[in-house]
Image (cartoon, rainbow, N blue to C red):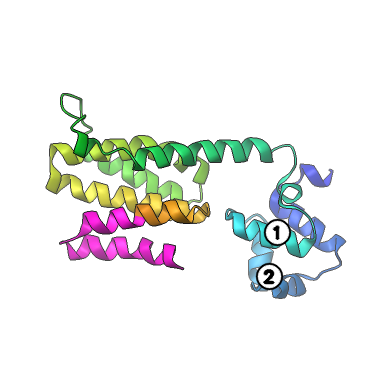
């Protein structure tokens, strides 16, 4: 099997061995633990952050495209950029302000809660491409729910902005993540429980 055909974790191991680095020395250069390196190489821990991929590539003295695989990378990058653009557009659309939700079917509270639960599950399982696909439509739905019932819909708005901010941090979209976290904080104002949850994502963005 050629280096380009390997999954990213095994490609890291392949290139590390070629550079004659032990897992410990490689980990030391990255500022990570040996356990972290071992999990990455065994595909237990996914490499999802662009900044981390760049750091790994720099230590291995290759470019990020080589580390990710030349064949798959352009399509992955294009899909991610398109998805982020759709999320940006959804964050910029305020149907609750413009009144566009009038007369349109609104997702029920139960369905919306299930959709948000599914989004959080996708995030926790590191299924970021799937979450990129889900979020634009989900953000639109929570805006509509907020128009129908501002108080009940506020919970969904905060949750949607929180998961959006969390995803965008993973994608190294700092400015957009800050916008989503700020929206979550604003929507949560007056509710200490919601505000505490929103503060978690604000803290992620600030780091």
Residue at position x 26%, y 47% in the image: 157
Disc on res. 114: none
Specify whether residue 136 is in view. yes
In this picture, residue 21 sits left or right of residue 7: right
Question: Which of labels 1 and 2 is toward the front?
Answer: 2
Residue sitting farthest toward the top? 103
- Counting from the top left corner in percent of width and height, residue 101 is at 20, 30
Residue at position x 29%, y 51% in the image: 159
Contact? badges 1 and 2 (CB < 8 Å): no
- Counting from the top left corner in percent of width and height, residue 105 is at 20, 26
Is disc 1 surrounded by few (<14), some (14 to 19) or many (20+) residues within 10 Å? Answer: many
Task: Please report whichever mark, 1 or 2, sits nearer to the chain's N-terminal start.
Answer: 2
Mark pair 1, 2: CA separation? 14 Å
- Counting from the top left corner in percent of width and height, residue 7 is at 71, 47
Residue at position x 74%, y 61% in the image: 58
Residue at position x 71%, y 52% in the image: 64
12 and 149: which is toward the camera: 149
Is disc 2 surrounded by few (<14), some (14 to 19) or many (20+) residues within 10 Å? Answer: some
- Counting from the top left corner in percent of width and height, residue 146 is at 19, 41
Dividing the image into 4 quarters, which one contains the N terminus?
Answer: top right
* Disc 1 element: helix
The picture quadrant where one finds residue 107 is top left
Question: Does the stretch in magenta take in 23?
Answer: no
- The part of the chain drawn in magenta is 181-207
Q: Which residue is disc 2 drawn over?
A: 30
Judge whether 16 appears above or below 103 on screen. below
In this picture, residue 159 sits left or right of residue 124: left
Q: Which residue is disc 1 drawn over?
A: 41
């Amino acid at each position: 099997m050629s280096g380009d055909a390997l999954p990213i974790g095994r490609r890291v191991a392949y290139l590390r061995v070629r550079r004659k680095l032990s897992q410990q020395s490689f980990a030391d250069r990255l500022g990570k633990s040996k356990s972290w390196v071992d999990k990455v190489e065994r595909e237990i821990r996914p490499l999802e952050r662009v900044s981390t991929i760049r750091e790994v590539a720099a230590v291995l003295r290759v470019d990020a495209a080589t580390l990710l695989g030349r064949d798959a990378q352009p399509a992955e990058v294009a899909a991610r950029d398109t998805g982020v653009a759709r999320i940006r557009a959804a964050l910029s659309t305020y149907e609750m302000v413009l009144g566009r939700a009038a007369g349109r079917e609104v997702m029920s509270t139960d369905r919306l809660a299930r959709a948000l639960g599914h989004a959080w599950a996708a995030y926790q399982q590191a299924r970021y491409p799937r979450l990129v696909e889900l979020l634009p439509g989900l953000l639109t739905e929570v805006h509509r729910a907020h128009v129908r019932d501002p108080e009940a819909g506020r919970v969904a708005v905060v949750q949607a902005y929180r998961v959006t901010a969390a995803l965008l941090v993973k994608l190294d979209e700092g400015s957009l993540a800050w916008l989503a976290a700020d929206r979550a904080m604003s929507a949560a104002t007056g509710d200490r429980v919601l505000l505490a949850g929103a503060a978690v994502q604000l803290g992620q963005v600030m780091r």
